[in-house]
Image (cartoon, rainbow, N blue to C red):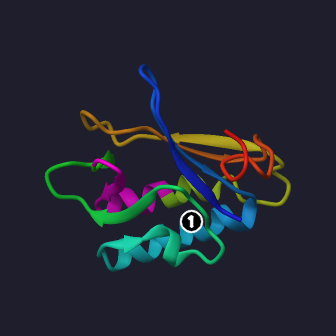
């Protein structure tokens, strides 16, 4: 099950995605579909079984890029090219022989929240029943 949530911090806030290979492959596939047809999509609704306490929309970039806090909900603002490159990086975590690993994803835009995609580094209940 793909889990994702904003992890607030005074110094290093982070938006965290957790899952196993198939979960991360589903996220990469969503990013590739978005790259082909950029339009706003709710991540939780597009990936069966995904869970989060935070609303997250994948949206075409406007004058901002990267993960943005909209005051209670989040938007991951990407161009089609950025979505393709991020999908490629996430797919590197999905092969069965990779038991764990992570990627920090940033566009390099002022004010964006870094995104961490992690496989096998947290327990299955993290972001669900723990915190």
Q: Nearer the viewer, residue 117 or 107?
A: 117
Secondary structure under tag 1 reads: helix
Relative to 11, 101 lies left or right: right
**Residue placed under numbered mark 1 in the picture:** 27
Residue pushed farthest top?
Answer: 11
Left or right, 104 with reference to 109: right
Residue at the spot 51% in from the left edge and 60% down from the top edge: 87
- What residue range appears in magenta? 71-86
* Residue at horizontal 57 percent and vertical 74 percent from the top: 47
Q: Quadrant of the C terminus?
A: top right
The N terminus, quarter of image: bottom right
Q: How many labels, in total?
A: 1
Q: Mark 1 Cα within 10 Å, few/some/many (few <14, many 20+)?
A: many
Direction from residue 38 to residue 33 in the image, left or right: right
Q: For residue 37, which quarter of the picture?
A: bottom left
In percent of width and height, residue 75 lies at: 33, 56
* Whole-percent x, y for residue 112 in the image: 32, 39
The residue positioned 37% from the left and 64% from the top of the image is 57
- Horizontal side, residue 130 vs residue 60: left or right: right
Q: Is residue 13 magenta?
A: no
Picture coordinates of residue 49 (x, y %)?
66, 73
Q: Considering only vertical position in the picture, is 21 above or below 116? A: below
Image coords of residue 76 (percent x, y): 36, 55
Q: Residue furthest toward the left?
A: 63
Q: Quadrant of residue 100?
A: top right
Image height check: is 117 above or below 41? Answer: above
Foreground of the two, 122 or 10: 10
Residue at 55%, 72% in the rendered image? 29
């Amino acid at each position: 099950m793909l889990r994702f949530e904003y992890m607030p911090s005074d110094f290093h806030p982070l938006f965290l995605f957790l899952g196993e290979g198939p979960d991360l492959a589903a996220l990469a596939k969503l990013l590739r579909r978005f790259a082909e047809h950029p339009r706003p999509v709710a991540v939780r609704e597009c990936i069966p079984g995904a869970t989060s306490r935070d609303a997250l929309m994948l949206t075409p970039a406007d004058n901002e890029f990267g993960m943005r806090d909209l005051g209670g909900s989040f938007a991951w603002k990407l161009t089609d090219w950025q979505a393709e490159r991020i999908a490629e990086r996430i797919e590197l975590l999905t092969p069965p022989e990779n038991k764990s690993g992570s990627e920090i994803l940033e566009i390099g835009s002022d004010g964006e929240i870094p995104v961490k995609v992690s496989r096998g580094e947290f327990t299955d209940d993290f972001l669900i029943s723990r915190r």
